[in-house]
Amino acid sequence: MMSQTIGVFGLLFLTLANCQVIRVETDTTNYGPVSMVVDNLAEIAVDVSDETTAQLEGKINRTQQDIAGNIEVLTANALAQLSDVIFETNQILVANPDCNVAWSLDDLNDNVTHQVGGCMGGLGDLLENFRLEGQLALERVQELVQEMAQLPAKCQMLGTSPLNPVASAGGSVCFINAMAEINKGMAQSLHNASLLLVQTHQTTEDQVEQAQRCCATVVQQVGDYLHEEQDQCQQQ
Ligand SMILES: *[C@@H]1O[C@H](CO)[C@@H](O)[C@H](O)[C@H]1NC(C)=O
Ligand SMILES: *[C@@H]1O[C@H](CO)[C@@H](O)[C@H](O)[C@H]1NC(C)=O
Ligand SMILES: *[C@@H]1O[C@H](CO)[C@@H](O)[C@H](O)[C@H]1NC(C)=O
């Protein structure tokens, strides 16, 4: 993330530096060349930023998939661990119709599903929050790219006369200043987005550990309970 960020800003600052040089050469001619240069620079900056935005979106998507995948795998594991003992208990009950049990298989399944689902609460909340915050982080970056794309049009509005060199100078000063401002916002937004990703990965690890401990407890308790039921049934 950091090296990409530096790459992007290296390039944007480079475009600003080019702009400065070209401005000196073309200011005193007419509006056309400056306008074209500004258009091209804005286009390059937008292309680079679009790429950065797509990469950020990809990282956000992968992070979401990672959390959702953890929920699926942990749930499937816990249910798989219990399904054997549930099946075995059910066989024993079927073979011993006189056994008087105080529960039904459906209730037990509901109970297990409910408890394992509860173990995923932390990861579920994390996923929900990250969906929102990731979307906001992406929108902030997309807004800045859009501002960038609109800069040539916005800054040329200052040049009222195409043949007025002062006006065209105003246009490129406007462009350079606005681009510097957008760069600052972009750096801040990408920094925030990368903090969000790093924090989310750390929190995911913590929540996965908690969910694993929680599932292990449920598996243990339900397993113990069913083994007791089996013993009682077979003693009768
Ligand atoms: C991210 O996910 C969204 C929604 O599922 C999808 O529309 C988009 O193409 C994905 N983007 C990337 C870069 O993977
Ligand atoms: C599930 O079973 C456990 C232990 O057998 C019990 O303490 C708990 O109240 C049950 N929960 C539900 C939702 O039925
Ligand atoms: C970045 O995060 C800081 C602290 O959370 C916040 O104050 C600031 O508004 C954010 N900036 C952007 C551009 O998202």
Image (cartoon, helix red, strand yellow):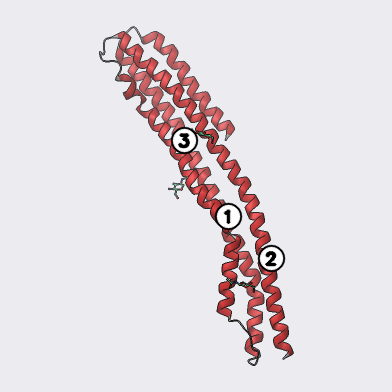
C-alpha separation, residue under disc 3 versus residue under disc 2 = 46 Å
Identify the residue at horizontal 57%, vertical 74% (top origin). 109
Instruction: Kindly identify which residue carries mark 1.
Output: 123
Kind of residue sitting beneath label 3 = Glu
Q: Are marks 3 and 2 in contact (CB under 8 Å)?
A: no
Q: Is residue 135 above or below residue 228?
A: above
Q: Quadrant of the N terminus?
A: top right
Q: Position of residue 50 (x, y in %)?
A: 44, 35
Q: Quick one: label 2, few (<14), some, or many (20+) residues within 10 Å?
A: some
Instruction: Kindly identify which residue carries mark 2.
Output: 217
C-alpha separation, residue under disc 2 versus residue under disc 1 = 17 Å
Q: Depth check: 15 or 207 in front?
A: 207
Identify the residue at horizontal 60%, vertical 67% (top origin). 115
Kind of residue sitting beneath label 1 = Leu
**228 displayed left or right of 124:** right
Q: Position of residue 134 (x, y in %)?
A: 49, 44
Determine if the C-beta at disc 2 is less than 8 A from ligand 2: no
Q: Is residue 142 above or below residue 73?
A: above
**58 displayed left or right of 81:** left
Secondary element type, mark 3: helix
Q: Earlier in the sequence, mark 1 or mark 3?
A: 3
C-alpha separation, residue under disc 1 versus residue under disc 3 = 30 Å
Q: Quick one: label 1, few (<14), some, or many (20+) residues within 10 Å?
A: many
Q: Depth check: 148 or 131 in front?
A: 131
Q: Which of the labelled discs sits on residue 151, or is there none? A: none
Instruction: Kindly identify which residue carries mark 3.
Output: 51
